[in-house]
Image (spheres, rainbow, N blue to C red):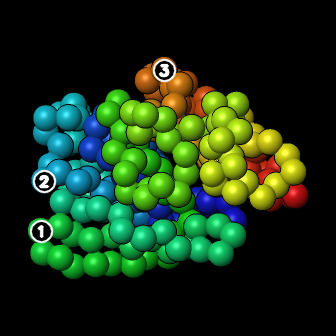
Amino acid sequence: MIWKSGEEVIVVGGGNSAGQAAVFLAQTTRRVFMLVLAGGFAETMSRYLIRRIEESPTIDLRTNSKVVSLEGRDHLEHVQWRDNKNGNVETHKISALFSMIGAVPNSNWLGGCVACDARGFIKTGTDLSKEDLDHSDWPLTREPHLLETSLPRVFAVGDVRSGNIKRIASAVGEGSIVVSFVHRVLSE
């Protein structure tokens, strides 16, 4: 399933990239859950973006929150997160999660389900070694697509990806490119 406008989506992160993504997605979604691990983002986000997020009726900001489970058969169907302050766990029907975790990747929540480099950035496409693919039991006869992780049909773009150049324009470009790969793997 490809994400469609009018659905609920999640943006994980508390920096400017996450804020820009949430504001952008809020224009076409029913609701954007914005999950921030810290208690706020005044130190990591511009005041202008904070104001836009606070004023948006479709952005549901959840601070002190962490993704604890991703569920689905052949695509993302449900996401579960925990409020680390009160311990409450919520599960929502979500088909798109945008990880905007920044220059220092906070990818350990992936639990080793995709190959990462020594610094924790997600390896994709030609950056995946034969050992990475062997370790992940790559089941397909084809090599991973350009932005595909070691888990077939799971893609990574932007700052969390190994080899990224930490520019919003390139992250947007990668997001545009990955759509064609998503269509390709859905037709396999």
- Residue under pointer 2: 39
Amino acid type at circle 3 is Ile
Q: Earlier in the sequence, mark 1 or mark 3?
A: 1
The amino acid at mark 1 is Lys
Label 2's element? Answer: loop
Q: Which mark is residue 31?
A: none
Residue in view at x 63 percent, y 51 percent: 135
Which numbered circle lies on residue 85? 1
For label 3, the residue is 165
Q: Is 55 situated left or right of 159 in this image? A: left
- How far apart, in angstroms, are the residues tagged by discs 3 and 2? 28 Å
Q: CA distance from mark 1 to mark 3?
A: 34 Å
Q: Residues within 10 Å of mark 3 (few under 14, many from 20)?
A: few
**Residue pictured at 53% horizontal, 57% vertical:** 113
Query: Along the polypeptide, which appears first: circle 3 or circle 2?
Result: 2
Which mark's residue is nearer the viewer, 3 or 2? 3
Q: Quadrant of the C terminus?
A: bottom right
The residue nearer to you, when weighing 101 against 42, is 101
Q: Residue at 50% across / 41% down in the picture?
A: 116
Q: Which quarter of the rendering shows the N terminus?
A: bottom right
In the image, what residue type sits under mark 2?
Gly
Q: Nearer the viewer, residue 99 or 2?
A: 99
Q: Earlier in the sequence, mark 2 or mark 1?
A: 2
| Tag 1 secondary structure | loop
Residue nearer the viewer, 129 or 106:
129
Task: Look at the numbered discs 2 and 1 and tell me whether their residues touch, using CB distance below 8 Å.
Answer: yes
Q: Residue 63 vs residue 32: left or right?
A: left
The reply to whether residue 124 is visible in this rendering is yes
Q: Residue 96 at x, y = what percent?
A: 54, 59
